[in-house]
Amino acid sequence: MNAPLNHPLPLLDLDVLRTFTAIAETGSFTAAANAVFRTPSAVSMQIKKLEDILGRPVFSRDARSVALTTDGEMLLGYARRLLAINREAVSKFIVPDIVGVVRLGSPDDYGERVLPQVLKRFAQSHPSIAVDVTIDQSSNLRRRMDDRALDITLLTNSYKASATGAEVLLTEAIVWAGAKGGCAHLREPLPVSVWEEGCVWRAGALEALGSQGRNYRVAYMSAHAAGQRAAILADLAVAPLPKSFLGCDMVELGAKDGMPEIGTYNLAMIVAAGASPPVQAVAEHIRATFETFKETGRF
């Protein structure tokens, strides 16, 4: 029989764990402070408190970068699971009786690939909340938020800058996608399929090709993810896509294929100031979805 503990283990603060995961994902105390709506000094104090509790450093820091220690890597998995479980538990007891309508905006790519599953699960746990979805370009969605025509929206942002007031949900690599067994990337000039002007994936891809000095032509242009996939699978062109968007019938094209590195982008969320309980419920559900994705790789 085990003897009872005279000194119970300390409890980890979920708010501190949220800050910790934000730093791990952004690689910056300043960026994390913006994501969790705290000052950089408050974020530093939270991490000091966390490290004091654990008795070990969770980040290694120098003048230019922040990286997880081995212990920090271990903690990150636990932190993501604890945050996801907390949101699931709270949603079961606090928000199911909320009633209302939420106006949600999303770029086409996430509106097609992610939102159907997200909204299906949300409808099961919040049957009294109706969600009206608007699909549009990120720049137009931001204007709709400014005009108060939306309550909450997802945006794709350049890795170099995030929209003011936006909460970063995911930072992901943009890669060149080609058809499995295809040869579009070998053609000269390179046939490229891109979105319309203003798309951050397009901007990053064309900038990378320009820096490489690669001749290219825009062979296919579509504002819809389905159109992009059609061009890739027909081997008409290569296209910049988030790495997680690659299907089994696509391949990532890299340096060995003569393709330049593009970089990363941010998927961010903006919630209207003074959001109602239904809007807050949708926002929490979306946050939990992306935390689970970062942990499991599945939506």
Image (cartoon, rainbow, N blue to C red):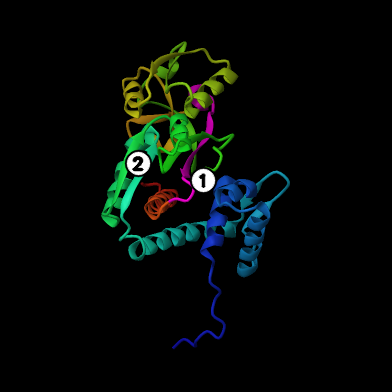
Residue shown at 39% from the left, 63% from the top: 90
Mark before the other along the chain sequence, 1 or 2? 2
Residue, disc 2: 114
Nearest to the observer: residue 96 or residue 295: 96
Which amino acid type is marked by label 2?
Val
Q: Is residue 77 left or right of residue 249?
A: right
Q: Quadrant of the N terminus?
A: bottom left
Mark 1 to mark 2 CA distance (whole Å): 18 Å
Residue, disc 1: 167
The reply to whether callout 1 and callout 2 are in contact (CB within 8 Å) is: no
Q: Position of residue 28 (x, y in %)?
A: 62, 47
Which residues lie in the magenta part? 254-275
Question: What secondary structure is found at the residue carrying circle 2?
Answer: loop
Nearest to the observer: residue 125 or residue 151: 151
Q: Say if 59 sits above or below 168 in the image.
A: below
Q: How many labels sit on residues? A: 2
Nearest to the observer: residue 162 or residue 176: 162
The image quadrant that residue 163 belongs to is top right
